[in-house]
Image (cartoon, rainbow, N blue to C red):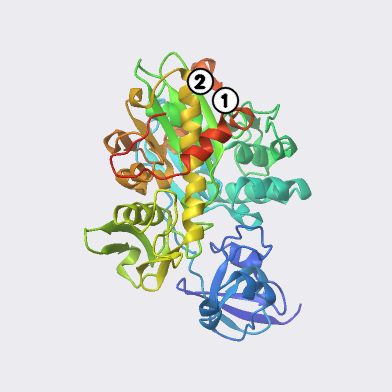
Amino acid sequence: MGAKVRIELDPLGVVLEAEAGATLESLLSEYGVEFPCGASGLCGGCKVQVLEGAAEPEEADLLALTEDEIAAGYRLACRLRADSPLKLRVEQWSMPVLSDDTEGARLGRSGLAVAIDLGTTTIVAQLLDLKTGEVVGLRTALNPQSAFGADVMSRVRASIESPELTRVIREFLGQTIADMAGHRLPEIVEVVLVGNTVMHHLFCGLDVKPLAHVPFHSAHLGEQRLEPEALDWRLAPRARVRFLPCLGGFVGSDILAGILATGLHVGPKLRALVDLGTNGEIALGNSERILCASTAAGTAFEAGAIRMGMRAAAGAISHVFWDGSSLRCGVIGETAPRGICGSGLIDAVAAGLDMGSILPNGRIANGTRELLLHQPVKLFQADVRELQLAKGAIAAGLRILLDHWGARMDEIECVYLAGAFGNYVRPESACRIGLLEVPAERLVPSGNTALRGAKLAIGVEEFPVMNIIEHVPLASDPQFEDKFVSCMAFPADADALRQA
């Protein structure tokens, strides 16, 4: 055994021991530090602050971080080594993971079931009593695969090179279920998982190579059933583990679950479901027909590509308002601001448009290429461009689906906003920047529809709704590029909702 070095994590109050000279990447990933670029040292998203101890900046630190950040002790976690005792401020450690308080189906029989929303960034698992439908256990966590990259394409590339991502997520979920159920573990008779197509393939051990290139089509999109023994899970042999079917390309079973949860397939009125994330997923339809698509929105909605972006943790600017004379910022934890999260980014750009500091073409108007929000947090020109790319992709995707449907934007009765980001973003700001081109009152934050739908799927063998769902591959649509470019600009004023 080699010498050990003490590593203290603030504000967690956690003290760890690392092998002297070892890299800290794997150790820190267990405590919420993400490595958006797969620990390549390019993005700066894994920065931590060295409060005590020596950690001289390396070339990657100097390239990815500002001079002020270097002077304040910030370093890239992917480059840190345990050369001496360190006290680190881990600013990424906390983020809201959206659960769901609705009950599951009351099947009237003894036993337990588990519903899991396996997200790219976060995981939510609930334990349910099959007789009463009551939620009797809950676990939320960051996806441990984040150490291999923040977005789905980073995970695909990493998985092609190594099978570790499958092993890591299976072990993690197996332990999560065991911890949640405790002595009642043998009572579990069913586990239902939902997630995007990449999460589906990685968990099930399927080949992800077809998802690495156009046309992004896999032959293994159907429901997968796995034996507990094959997963090395300590469940009863009779228990079944099901990962619900994907809908096509990068549209996963999380959207199928969302359709079930919102009742998008019930009734004649045209409605939409939008999951805003790195992989933006959209469904549009009614009881007769549902079209779905996915579009690469990037990490702007999660502030991953934003210079002063951070998770929705203490110190993050989460809301920005223009009161007619000045900007007012809401900060999580009512503490000094340190950065800006996704909902704050949307608000900041919307406010910048209203006050004239940001032009409809996306340029910051003051000539400095930056906009001060609340000292020391600023919005930079590159941040606005990242948001334009993300919102342009979502808006163009919805327009394409409307074209395929043969409908107009004003015919959509409502748009359900799924997931954590959709739950916290202000509808008025989403409309102001042209992210969703419908009136704000038609936007309905809907919580974790993936988890809710997974609970509804427990004990259900078939999903007739699959017969009316059609996947529209945007990558091969000849109109997508033109619509994407036209959707990048911001509306000229708050009432300028453009029609598709």
Kind of residue at badge 2: His
Q: Residue at x 42, y 47 (%)?
A: 421
**Is residue 20 placed above or below 171 in the rendered structure?**
below
Q: Give the image location of residue 290, x and y in percent.
A: 47, 20
| Secondary structure type for disc 1 | loop
Which residue is identified by label 2?
404
Label 1, on which residue?
472
Residue 135 visible in the current orientation: yes
Q: Please tell me whether residue 18 is drawn above or below residue 171 in the rendered image.
A: below
Q: Are marks 1 and 2 in contact (CB under 8 Å)?
A: yes
Position of residue 399 measured from the top left corner of the image (x, y, whole percent): 46, 29
Residue 384 left/right relative to 57: left
- Which mark sits nearer the N-terminus, 1 or 2? 2
Circle 2 SS class: helix
| Nearer to us in this view, 426 or 465 | 426
Other residues around mark 1 within 10 Å, as few (<14) / some (14–19) / many (≥20)? many
Q: How many numbered discs sit on the rendered protein?
A: 2
